[in-house]
Amino acid sequence: YFRPIVEGWNDQESKIKKVLQTGEKFASAIAIGGLRMSTEIQKVLEEKDVFIPNYNDAYSPKNIPSKIESKILRIHKEFSLTVPLFKHTSCAVSYIFNIPNYNELYKKSKLNCLDTCPDQQQNNCLTHTS
């Protein structure tokens, strides 16, 4: 995993490069995602006086701002990395086991799929019938 990715915490190019290069060396896939804020997490961060980015609700999804996602994808491409990046754990796990996505996220591929998803995995998902 490369989670949580939070603006101002770990979205600097140098950190992204290091994580992606480490993933290239040691991982079969990398799932990227933001922080899923909860009231419990927010309380602990406030107690530790940690900067908390603005979230829309008390239980936000693990979304990454598009500018950070674009930066990650650009760096992945610049370094010609081959380890695939995925937005969802189910995508990464499905890729590793060479099966269609068990959450059927491919049904909304524009929302859920990254360009780094290998052709073989896209075919697994697209040829799957429920």
Image (spheres, helix red, strand yellow):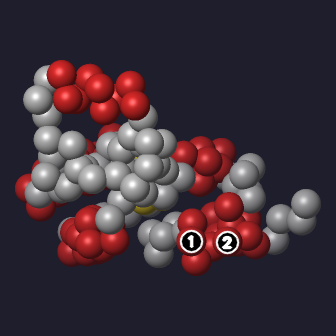
Residue for point 26% across, 65% down: 68
Which residue is under mark 1? 111
- Horizontal arrangement in the rendering, residue 35 relative to residue 111 (left or right): left
Residue for point 11% across, 29% down: 49
- Horizontal arrangement in the rendering, residue 96 relative to residue 79 (left or right): right
Q: Is residue 12 visible?
A: yes
Reply above or below: 52 against 114.
above
Which residue is under mark 2? 108
* Whole-percent x, y for residue 96 in the image: 58, 47
Residue 67 lies in what quarter of the image? bottom left
* Whole-percent x, y for residue 73 in the image: 31, 70
Residues at circles 2 and 1 in contact by the CB criterion of under 8 Å? yes
Give the structural element (helix, strand or loop) at label 1. helix
Q: Quadrant of the N terminus?
A: top left
Give the structural element (helix, strand or loop) at label 2. helix
The circle on residue 6 is none
Question: Disc 2 and disc 1: Cα gap in Å?
Answer: 6 Å
Local crowd size for mark 1, using a 10 Å CA cut-off: few (<14), some (14–19), many (≥20): few
Residue 38 lies in what quarter of the image? top left
Q: Nearer the viewer, residue 112 or 84?
A: 112
Q: Quadrant of the C terminus?
A: bottom right
The amino acid type found where label 1 is placed reads Leu
- Horizontal arrangement in the rendering, residue 27 relative to residue 79 (left or right): right
Local crowd size for mark 2, using a 10 Å CA cut-off: few (<14), some (14–19), many (≥20): few
The amino acid type found where label 2 is placed reads Lys
Residue for point 59% across, 54% down: 91
Reply above or below: 106 against 63.
below
Q: Nearer the viewer, residue 103 or 99?
A: 103
* Whole-percent x, y for residue 36 in the image: 42, 42
